[in-house]
Image (spheres, coloured by chain):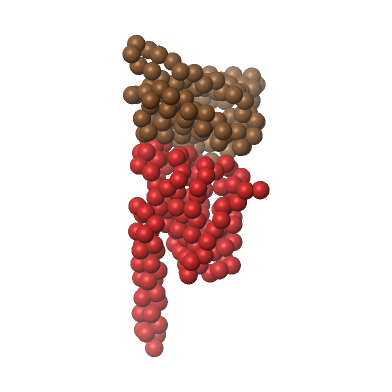
Chain colours: A brown, B red
C-alpha cells in the first residue's frame, strides 16, 4: 500500500485493523499494533514524503501474527541508535515515534542507509 | 473541508471527536478551539475521545497542546471517555498526557470542570473580601 498524503494514514490504519481482526487479535494488541503503525507511517510521510507499506499475515509454529514493512526512499537516518532513544527528534515532535513503536510490538527491525532510504519492519504476534 | 464541531454550553466548550482524525483536521481543531476559548471567554473545555480507537504520539501531543493553550487562556481542559486499550497503549508508548485532566465519561468530566471552576471562583471571592 502506497502512502503519499496525510489522509492515507487513516485508510492505512483501517487496513491494518482489518488484518488484525481477521487473525483474531485481541483489542489491546490491535490497538498497540495500529498505534505503532501510525507512528511509523507518520515518520515516513514527514521525513521521506511517503513510501510503501507491505502488510502480511505470518505464522510461526502455532502463532499467527502480522508483519508490516515500511519502505521509503527518503534521506535515511545517520545515527539509528540515537534515533531509537526516547526524546530524540530532528523534527519538532516528542521523539517518541521510533522507541515508542518498538515498545508496542513483538519484533522490531530497522535498516537505514543515508541517501538511500529506510526500511522498518515490525511484527506483532496475535498473543504477543 | 471536514471540521470537528465545537459546541458551547454555558461556560464550557464541548468537542466530541467521532472520526479518526488525520493530521490537518487535528491541527485545525487545536486552533479553532483556542480561538473559541478566546471569543467566548469559556472557562472549561471538554473533549470526548470515546470514539477514537487509537491515540498516537501526534494526537497525544495535540491534546496536550490544547490543554496548555487553554490553560494560559484561563480555561481548564478535560479529556473524557478514553478506551482502556488506548490508555494501555499510550503509557507503553511513553505518553502521559501531562497538562490535561481526564475523566471516565462526559458526566464525570462535567462535574470535574464545574468543581475546578467553582473552586477558582471561591478563591477569587476570598481574595476580594480580604481587600475590603
Could you tell me if residue B72 is visible in this image?
Answer: no
> How many numbered tags mark residues here?
0
Image coordinates for residue B51, horizontal then vertical, percent: 45, 45
- What residue appears at the point 52 percent right and 65 percent down from the top-left corner? B8
Image coordinates for residue A106, horizontal then vertical, percent: 39, 23
Front one among B16 and B122 = B16
Image coordinates for residue B100, horizontal then vertical, percent: 42, 54
Left or right side of A18 for B81 = left
Front one among B8 and A84 = B8
- What residue appears at the point 37 percent right and 23 percent down from the top-left corner? A126
Left or right side of A42 for B76 = left
Residue most extreme to the bottom: B132
Q: Quadrant of residue A113?
A: top right
Front one among B32 and B81 = B81
Picture quarter with the C terminus of chain A: top left
Q: Quadrant of residue B92?
A: top left
Picture quarter with the N terminus of chain A: top right
Residue most extreme to the front: A22
- What residue appears at the point 58 percent right and 29 percent down from the top-left corner? A44
Left or right side of B7 for B127 = left
Image position of B93 with respect to A80: above or below: below
Image position of B84 with respect to A119: above or below: below
Image coordinates for residue A100, horizontal then vertical, percent: 44, 33
Image position of A32 with respect to B38: above or below: above
Residue most extreme to the top: A61
Could you tell me if residue B56 is visible in this image?
Answer: yes
Front one among B131 and B64 = B64
- What residue appears at the point 38 percent right and 27 percent down from the top-left corner? A25
Amino acid at each position: 500500500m502506497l502512502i503519499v498524503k496525510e489522509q492515507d494514514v487513516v485508510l492505512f490504519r483501517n487496513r491494518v485493523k482489518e488484518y488484525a481482526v481477521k487473525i483474531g487479535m485481541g483489542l489491546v494488541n490491535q490497538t498497540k499494533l495500529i498505534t505503532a503503525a501510525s507512528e511509523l507511517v507518520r515518520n515516513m510521510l514527514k521525513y521521506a514524503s511517503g513510501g510503501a507499506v507491505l502488510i502480511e499475515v505470518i505464522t510461526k509454529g502455532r502463532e499467527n501474527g502480522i508483519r508490516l514493512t515500511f519502505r521509503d526512499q527518503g534521506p535515511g537516518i545517520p545515527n539509528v541508535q540515537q534515533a531509537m532513544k526516547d526524546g530524540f527528534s530532528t523534527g519538532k515532535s516528542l521523539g517518541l515515534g521510533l522507541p515508542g513503536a518498538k515498545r508496542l510490538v513483538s519484533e522490531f527491525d530497522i535498516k537505514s542507509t543515508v541517501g538511500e532510504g529506510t526500511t522498518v519492519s515490525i511484527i506483532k504476534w496475535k498473543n504477543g | 473541508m471536514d471540521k470537528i464541531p465545537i459546541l458551547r454550553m454555558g461556560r464550557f466548550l464541548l468537542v466530541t471527536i467521532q472520526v479518526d482524525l488525520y493530521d490537518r483536521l487535528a491541527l485545525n481543531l487545536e486552533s479553532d478551539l483556542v480561538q473559541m476559548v478566546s471569543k467566548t471567554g469559556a472557562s472549561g473545555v471538554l473533549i470526548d475521545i470515546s470514539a477514537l480507537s487509537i491515540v498516537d504520539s501526534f494526537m497525544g501531543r495535540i491534546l496536550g497542546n490544547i490543554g496548555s493553550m487553554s490553560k494560559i487562556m484561563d480555561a481548564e481542559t478535560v479529556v473524557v471517555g478514553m478506551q482502556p486499550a488506548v490508555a494501555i497503549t499510550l503509557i507503553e508508548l511513553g505518553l502521559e498526557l501531562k497538562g490535561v485532566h481526564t475523566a471516565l465519561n462526559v458526566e464525570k468530566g462535567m462535574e470535574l470542570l464545574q468543581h475546578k471552576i467553582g473552586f477558582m471562583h471561591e478563591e477569587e471571592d476570598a481574595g476580594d473580601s480580604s481587600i475590603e
